[in-house]
Image (tube, grey):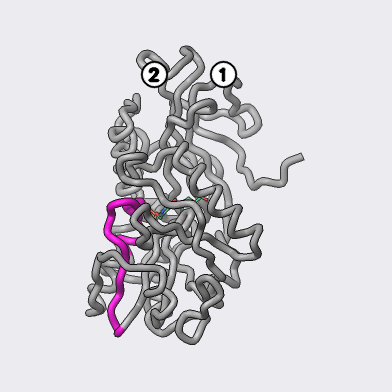
Amino acid sequence: MSDAPKSEKIWMDGSFVEWDQANVHVMTHTLHYGMGVFEGIRCYKTAKGPAVFRLLEHTARLFASAKIVGMEIPFTQEQINNAILETIRVNRLEEGYIRPLVFLGDNRRGLNTTGVSTQVAVAVWRWGAYLGEEALTNGIRVKVASFARHHENVFMTKAKVCGAYVNSIMAKLEAVKAGYDEALLLDVAGHVAEGSGENIFIVRHGKLKTPPLTSVLEGITRDSVITIAREMGLAVEEQYFSRDEVYIADEAFFTGTAAELTPINSLDDRVIGRGGMGPVTRKLQTAYFAAFRGEAAEYENWLTYLDAPGS
Ligand code: PPE
């Protein structure tokens, strides 16, 4: 028996099916080679009902991912946006996680994917804090992974590709088995890249630094935090830095849809700053939480309300 969270219905290729009936054949192409793209989106409770955070940007990235790897999604972005909102509605989800997945079907074999059917599913489920509720306040213990992040000509990291996550999973398992909460992957040149499923920021001398988008995912939370930070008057530099700069940073944190804004307490057992959540991290986390809760007028346009008139 599975104890994985589920909901009632899944949107598959244009219609709803019962969660337990949303199955595919074992010869499904993506299952064999990992050629598929996906998204991770959150829906939050607000005073005006549930709202999806940065829906349009997530759907746009899904289509960008497909374009990069050469897949064609047989729906428009508008249809996918509507499918996502409908899936939340039919499952009466107030708050949780949304997983659109674009995958190749089972009608062809081999690496020439010409003519393989492209299928789309949207699932939603309730999902609390990704790294544990405590992580959001106390921070997490992180270890540099022995596996490097993809070189940009191995896997184009602006695409959120299913198969690329083998690299993330190996790094995550390595870290967890060694007693840490999360892995930090370096790029092939040895610069800090990202977490197994998060972008990273450090705070040093009052400035924020995050790696450029060469070999990391173009995170939507990363973009939100950069926007919020600049709005607050904080300087943000997109710049390469080394693991030892993280060791001696004043603060460090991860960003991601799932992880939200999680402080990093230590890296490779070196406590960062005073440990726990530093003042800049706290300010940014508070502002980010307010944005997705619909409590910040300037970021209202990041929210798509479920109960919006005419939707
Ligand atoms: N880097 C990677 C490798 C990554 O997977 C994510 C999201 C990010 C950065 C942050 O991107 P964004 O969510 O747009 O801010 N990771 C998703 C998957 C987590 C999972 O376990 O699955 C997520 O946060 O939803």
| Front residue of 244 and 253 | 244
Q: Amino acid at mark 1?
A: Met
Callout 2 crowding tier (Cα within 10 Å): few <14, some 14–19, many ≥20: some
> In 3D space, how far apart are the residues under numbered discs 1 and 2 (Cα atoms)?
14 Å
> Is residue 1 depicted above or below 273 in this figure?
above
Which tag, 1 or 2, sits closer to the chain's start? Answer: 1
Tell me if the residue at label 1 has its CB under 8 Å from ligand 1: no
Disc marking residue 27? 1
Magenta region, residue range = 205-224
Asked where in the image residue 159 lies, by quadrant, the reply is top left
Disc marking residue 129? none
Q: Quadrant of the C terminus?
A: top left
Residue at 56 percent across and 54 percent down: it is: 172
Asked where in the image residue 298 lies, by quadrant, the reply is bottom left
Q: Answer yes or no: is residue 214 visible.
A: yes
Residue at 41 percent across and 69 percent down: it is: 243
